[in-house]
Image (cartoon, coloured by chain):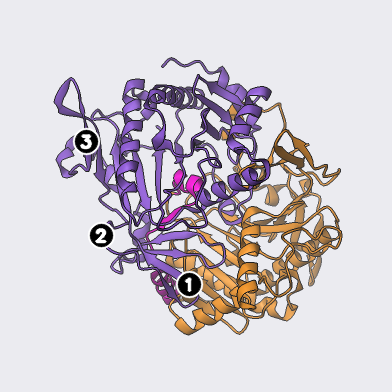
Chain colours: A orange, B purple
């Protein structure tokens, strides 16, 4: 059984694999998506190796799938069992209960989600919403983390099919807690949502806006840690992504595709990651310190292109030096013309 | 003038270069130590290009230096000027005031500090202590961050001389605040230092201890984010590194050299980083929320070997999956025999 362990000083929960059979040198080859690397794409060559948790069929051809959700093969969380919070001397531990799923975003061997059409990206968002609703019914789970790591064109020898990841957890990730805590402090002081205020200020100043449509705003973050770091913010205040009006999916897909194409075209198809920040589940049985009000959090997406070497001290210190002013990053990306 | 900008939600200060002349694509080539990359080592070929802030001479040969501290050429902080805290709408900004120094650790072209002898490493620690004392006299500064990024043998074409970095800041880095806050909460509850308690438990359990001598303990951290992540803890409670009894330098150098050699020999000379966590300056004029007591913080060093690919989502979410149990990491490193 994998373990969730809490750093006793800073309070961060970490998943630790407890398989004792691995030799230390094995960590060199343990990468996040090993089953997807190699000369053949596992999803193109052996799709039946992956029994689906959920499949969205092509409406014009019911035998063909559009998007499928499968369990991770090298999953590090386990859905069966009890959480069993316990002490280990002064340390805190619980069982690594949770879900670890891959969303295979297309049957075709397309690498970058930016190369899918907007209608298709809509459906990916609807699949996320369905998966979150399903996972919410599990009383043990508190948070669903949805993210994507795209490798870019730089790497040779690996063939990585367009996919995203869903991790459902019995705890809130540290950065989520920080965002919830910061947004709540602002709300307690101002009685307004900080993200709504950011949207208003960014629209007025108009120096960090990269793209905009009726429902969404894409900005270069004011205190970006990395060059070209950006946020996609829904204009309508809502703390839970999965409760978004489905009528807005099209505008979300459009702005996501547009900014990802701007990164691809303008920055030479680099690796990037995005993370979806939504409110934690609000369960009556376990209200918890991090319980959010409907008013004080605002779901959003953070996108980080990986352009610069990440120095280890930044991991260690939490201190970042960004050589690219966000205003210049926004100027540049705004100027890149893309068709969606 | 570079800017320090605060993330309005999570409260992290970030340094942002505000030079408008750079083209966006320039960030691809902006690496942390550009002046040290290339076919010739800048410190071997043109040492006079670097006017020293401080030099420690070789006692047997006064014309020859042992260790020298120079300003960073591509420095992003500026020592001259006022901090000028100000609002930018709802955002917080201050001038990028501070110091940015390189400690050139040896006149010889040695890459890994683990290959210097223990007497020499002693002197590097004494230079850090002298620089911190000097920087403390600047009323504008709150924290001195000392760290090292070692590149390993894997990269070709770059020649990087053994050096470490000193960054003096008018703010406390986010991770430092988290450590201070966590240690203070523990102290308020237990009236004991959490690091002292960790040392006692780790010695009793003896499953994560990698190395130990009279004054120091090296452990694989219980909730390690990365494989082989380790902490070096002084056994004597002290919040400020630079107030350490110089008689203990030898044992610090010895344990650091031993664990770095274990990493080099056992893990095939990988890149690594370390960060020194010491208490912030405690100045009467600006007590601040993060003021530490002498009792509640305990200086230490964190070492992170860079073995696995760092996925972008970990940056975004603050959630880590570590495939290597710290107990196995400690077992393995403990078994690696090294001579110092």
Where A114 sits versus A7, above or below?
below
Q: Is residue B275 above or below residue A166?
A: above
The x and y percentages for residue A304 are: 52, 60
Residue B147, percent across and down?
41, 41
How far is mark 1 from mark 2, CA to CA? Answer: 24 Å
Would you say residue A22 sits in the magenta stretch?
Answer: no
Between the residue at mark 3 and the residue at mark 1, the CA separation in whole angstroms equals: 41 Å
* Residue B245 point in image, percent of width and height: 40, 28
Farthest residue to the front: give it: B284
Callouts 2 and 3 close, C-beta under 8 Å: no
Residue drawn at the location 61% of the way across and 38% of the way down? B194
Kindly identify the residue that appears in the image at 35 percent across and 44 percent down. Answer: B166
Q: Which mark is residue B80?
A: 2
Which of marks 3 and 2 precedes in the sequence?
3
Q: Which quadrant of the rendered structure holds the N terminus of chain A?
A: top right
Q: Nearer the viewer, residue A332 or B285?
A: B285
Quadrant in which the C terminus of chain A is drawn: bottom right
List the residue tagged with mark 3. B55
Same subunit: marks 1 and 2:
yes
Task: Chain letter for mark 2, please.
Answer: B
Badge 3: residue crowd in 10 Å (few <14, some 14–19, many ≥20): some
Residue span colored magenta: A310-336
Q: Which residue is mark 1?
A: B91
């Amino acid at each position: 059984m994998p373990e969730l362990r809490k750093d006793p000083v800073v309070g961060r929960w970490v998943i630790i694999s407890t398989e004792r059979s691995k030799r230390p040198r094995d960590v060199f080859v343990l990468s996040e998506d090993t089953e997807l690397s190699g000369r053949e794409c596992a999803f193109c060559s052996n799709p039946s190796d992956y029994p689906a948790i959920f499949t969205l069929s092509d409406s014009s051809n019911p035998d063909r799938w559009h998007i499928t959700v499968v369990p991770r093969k090298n999953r590090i969380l386990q859905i069966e069992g009890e959480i069993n919070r316990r002490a280990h001397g002064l340390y805190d531990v619980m069982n690594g209960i949770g879900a670890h799923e891959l969303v295979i975003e297309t049957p075709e061997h397309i690498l970058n989600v930016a190369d899918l059409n907007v209608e298709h990206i809509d459906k990916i968002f609807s699949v996320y919403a369905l998966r979150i609703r399903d996972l919410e019914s599990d009383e043990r789970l508190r948070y669903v983390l949805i993210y994507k790591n795209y490798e870019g064109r730089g790497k040779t020898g690996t063939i990585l099919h367009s996919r995203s990841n869903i991790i459902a957890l019995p705890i809130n990730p540290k950065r989520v807690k920080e965002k919830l805590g910061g947004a709540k402090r602002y709300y307690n002081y101002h009685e307004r949502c900080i993200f709504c205020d950011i949207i208003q200020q960014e629209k007025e100043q108009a120096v960090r806006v990269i793209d905009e449509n009726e429902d969404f705003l894409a900005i270069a973050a004011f205190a970006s840690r990395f060059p070209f770091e950006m946020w996609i913010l829904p204009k309508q205040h809502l703390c839970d992504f999965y409760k978004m009006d489905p009528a807005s999916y099209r505008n979300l897909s459009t702005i996501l595709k547009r900014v990802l194409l701007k990164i691809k075209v303008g920055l030479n198809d680099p690796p990037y990651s995005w993370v979806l920040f939504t409110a934690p589940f609000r369960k009556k049985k376990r209200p918890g310190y991090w319980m959010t009000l409907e008013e004080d959090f605002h779901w959003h997406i953070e996108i980080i292109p990986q352009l610069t070497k990440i120095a280890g001290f930044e991991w260690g210190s939490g201190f970042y030096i960004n050589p690219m002013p966000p205003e210049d990053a926004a100027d540049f990306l705004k100027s890149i013309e893309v068709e969606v």
